[in-house]
Image (cartoon, grey):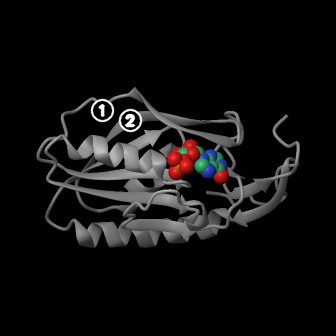
Amino acid sequence: MPDRTYPAHPDIEKVLLTGPQIQARIAELGAQISRDYAGRSLIMVSILKGSVIFLGDLMRAVSVDCSVDFIGLSSYSGAKSSGVVRLTLDLRENPEGKDILIVEDIVDTGLTIHYLMENLKTRGLRSLEVCTFLSKPECRKIEVPLKYVGFDIPNEFVVGFGLDYNEKFRNLPFVGVMRPNGGK
Ligand code: IMP
């Protein structure tokens, strides 16, 4: 994959994580997950839409058998969390008795992941863990157990590599901070 980090997008103030940095970390996460799930198979549950870019690369870095399913949750509009999480799309497959790995783009307040974990825990899973691409530990309103974290980042609104501002910037192959008034 070519490194399209530079020149950065005109709406981006600074690049936080370059494409090559991200790929190196995903390779490490994939190796760790493959070791932890050796001899088992897992279902990666990707939270739409932000985690799909990360999911695609993570899946290819994992060597154990894995399938994928999708769940839709919504708590954000623009750059602000509404704090209320809604299920907008449920899993297609029954996860009962399965090893489930939630794949998320970013954990901010923790409310979204907390809601999803509580929901999935009622469904008789064999195991449940979380792999998040990014985490903003300073912003937590509720503690959530994150087994795999790509990068801890500061409290800034970031876009790129799946993360959006009003549906824009998901296709940037790096993670960056928007300029004030960017995304218009
Ligand atoms: P939480 O419920 O506050 O942890 O928020 C999680 C969701 O908010 C993520 O899945 C993202 O969709 C969105 N989100 C939180 N911070 C950012 C950010 O910096 N950029 C883009 N989306 C974000």
Q: Position of residue 119 (x, y in %)?
A: 29, 40
Q: Residue at x 51, y 34 (%)?
A: 74
Q: Give the image quarter of residue 167.
A: top right
Q: Amino acid at mark 2?
A: Ile
- For label 2, the SS is strand
Gap between marks 1 and 2 measured at Cα: 5 Å
Do the numbered discs 1 and 2 sit on residues whose CB atoms are within 8 Å?
Answer: yes
- Identified at 86% across, 51% down, the residue is 179
| Residue 95 in which image quadrant | top left
The residue positioned 40% from the left and 62% from the top of the image is 61
Nearest the eye: 135 or 67: 135
Residue 47 placement, left or right of 178: left
From the image, tell me which residue sits under label 2: 71
In the depicted structure, whether residue 11 falls above or below residue 4: above
Is 93 on the left or on the right of 130, as rendered?
left
Q: Is residue 4 visible?
A: no
Asked whether residue 109 is in view, the answer is yes
Disc 1 target residue: 91
* Residue 13 x, y percent position in the rendering: 85, 57
Q: Residue 3 location, x and y as percent? A: 70, 61
Residue drawn at 35 percent across, 71 percent down: 31
- 10 Å crowding of disc 1: few (<14), some (14-19), many (20+): few
Residue 103 against residue 169 in the figure, above or below: below
- The C terminus lies in quadrant: top right
